[in-house]
Amino acid sequence: MGLTVINRIQEGLTTKRQNLTNWLSSAPEPDKEICLACEDEVDDQGLQAHLRVIDRALAKAADQTLGVCEVCHEQVNDRLLEMDYTACVCLDHYSYEERRQLENELELSQVVQRALLPRETPSIPGVDLAAFSRPAQIVGGDYFDFFKFRDGAHGMVIADVEGHGVSSSMLMSSLQTALHTLVPDNDSPIPVLERINRFYIHNINFTTFVTVFLSRFDPASRNLTYASAGHNPPLLLHVNGRDELSWLKPTAAAIGLIEEYHVRAETITLSPGDILLLYTDGVTEATNAINEPFGVDRLAAAVKEYSGLSAQELVRAIRQSLQAFCADKPLADDITLLVCKVYG
Ligand SMILES: [Zn+2]
């Protein structure tokens, strides 16, 4: 084991710890509630447990016992340790099944380091789709994409990396690759998000956290099943008659924050005319000259006002409302909007 690997892990863990504690002390309470998926009061127990795991690893790195195998007292494989800095048993000592699972994780980590896959143009029967994304800087931390689940259902994702710049865009591209690898092998968003969290939480290459909303849509039943890892609640407008608004709340904490990670899924049935709006926090947190945020109420009002338009026109109308509100003030954050309108 080269000392450089341990040094790199030490450095990565120190950055990770700093990022998490900074976020914990500086993020507004409502943001924490969403990212930690708390109902009303912020409960950061899961995050505290994660910080303790990081501290234990840092202590081991300091006294040079990090990655020492508990069975044979040799160093575990470098790649295994980079993927999971808590690894303390060589792959050889595991049972066949356990080894198979760990090798799958290693394989995923290799896939994830590779280049981006080409993006497919989405075509979902019965749904009018439009999207817009603009990074605040040269490279952004926002991401959206479309996939097919194993059974053919249409997958749609929107994600937001905490932080900006080159490292967050690298994290985005690795998330994209992980999703392209995992979604076609699964029928539900649950195992996909759980596996991505497991992969990210102790991986030294990922030093921050990500919010992800992942859904699957079956055009025949119009059922939308979603899981949201701490993402800003998408807005659903039931157009027929009453213009009922609902918000699709998180069903799990953001990816990379919580040790004991459980994901729930919710299923809703969309009706003709319904509008689903996915967005990142750059939209609701964009401010005007007197630092007022655009907020969810203005966003909802814009969707209601322009609900008769096509998906593409609706995206444009929301952008115009946002622009009018912010006037000349430059964007502080990336902005991503994704509109799905069920054909009436
Ligand atoms: Zn060993």
Image (cartoon, grey):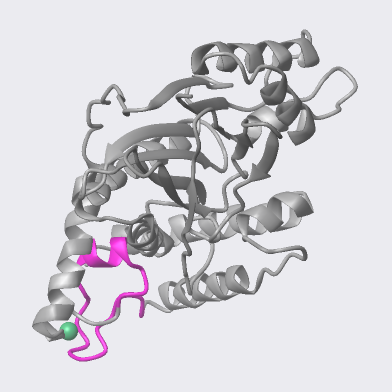
Horizontally, residue 95 falls left or right of residue 57, namely left
Tell me if residue 290 comes above or below residue 238 in the rendering: above
Residue beneath the point at 45% across and 74% down: 57
The location of residue 107, given as percent across then percent down, is: 16, 56
Ligand 1 image-quadrant field? bottom left
Residue beneath the point at 86% across and 17% down: 289
From this viewpoint, which residue is outermost toward the bottom?
A: 71
Where residue 309 sits, quadrant-wise, is top right
Residue beneath the point at 37% across and 74% down: 86
- Of 335 and 83, nearer the camera is 335
Residue beneath the point at 69% across and 38% down: 244
Query: Range of the magenta residues?
Result: 65-87
Screen quadrant of the N terminus: bottom left
Horizontally, residue 199 falls left or right of residue 324, namely left
The location of residue 179, given as percent across then percent down, is: 31, 45
The location of residue 306, given as percent across then percent down, is: 66, 16
